[in-house]
Amino acid sequence: LTSSSSYSKLRTQSATFPTFQKRSLFIQTAETPNPESLKFIPNGRLVLGHKSDEDSDRDAVDQEEDIDTTGNHDNQGVYLTRKDHTLIARSPLAKILFNLDEGVKSVYLGYDFITVTKYAEAHWQHLQTPIFGAIMDFYASGKPALLEVPEITDTTILEDDDEVVAMIKELLESRIRPAVQEDGGDIRYVGFEEDTGIVTVQLAGSCVGCPSSSVTLKNGVENMLMHYIPEVTSVISLDEDEEDESEGGDEVVVEQNSGDKKIKTYEERLAAAGIPFSD
């Protein structure tokens, strides 16, 4: 846990930290009564009041009116924890922040500020600069902080997905992807063959061509999916699958232990994996 000396350092710092500037965007940070929370204020820009580029085609005069100095705006913010998967899917900003580091505990989106709360064992000196970068990346994307409907991604659970596919996507998004992204890579869901039990994924970023990617795929991804989802028998990457076909390699088949107790429902499997169920 964070030592008392670390707490002292946080408390003895000035209430307002220096601003961070890049491409005319100033991000100011301020202490809160909670030493585990920092307030990030993108000066001259809104957060929940920020509109996407598609919804905001205004000239320079209108842009100057982007900040409401009258105080006549909706003060209701949005609070997100790692368990709020549906809500995170609607917030490109929160998704970026949670994917930064496992030390990020929660995110609060205000009208013109963001409050990030960390776990006690995490350290601000390791989190603060990446958070600055994430906020700048968000504004560069031109997306709103909160969408009306969730973004559709490779791990979005669709209406026609069965329980097995839904569980695979939940585990990939909540447990596996953050760990892979921490090393500069990514993993994307491609498909699931019900008759063979094979899950196909696609590796990206630093995972492509990495000597240890096959070990990660088999010992990490495959083991986790097989542990929580008995229907899964193997995990292969898209590139690996194509290479095997061209070289005529033998298919790798992982046998299941029939003595293991199978968890019957989607909700029970999520609970066993430590992931709260969400529609």
Image (cartoon, rainbow, N blue to C red):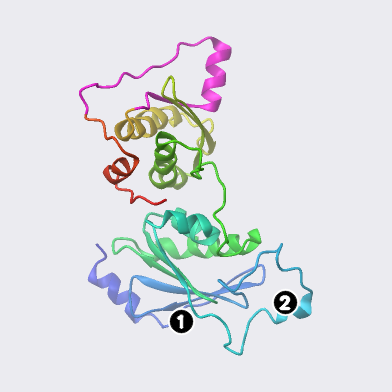
Nearer the observer, 160 or 262: 160
Q: Residue furthest bottom?
A: 70
Looking at the image, residue 200 sits to the left or right of residue 222; the answer is right
- Pointer 1: residues within 10 angstroms few (<14), some, or many (20+)? few
Q: Under tag 1, what secondary structure?
A: loop
Q: To which residue does mark 1 refer?
A: 16
Q: To which residue does mark 2 refer?
A: 63
Nearer the observer, 268 or 28: 268
Q: Is residue 251 magenta?
A: yes
Q: Amino acid at mark 1?
A: Thr
Give the residues in magenta: 231-260
Q: Amino acid at mark 2?
A: Gln
Q: Is residue 158 above or below residue 123?
A: above
Q: Is residue 212 above or below residue 51?
A: above
Where on the picture, by quarter, is residue 19? bottom right
Where on the picture, by quarter, is residue 72? bottom right
Residue found at x 57% / y 20%? 242
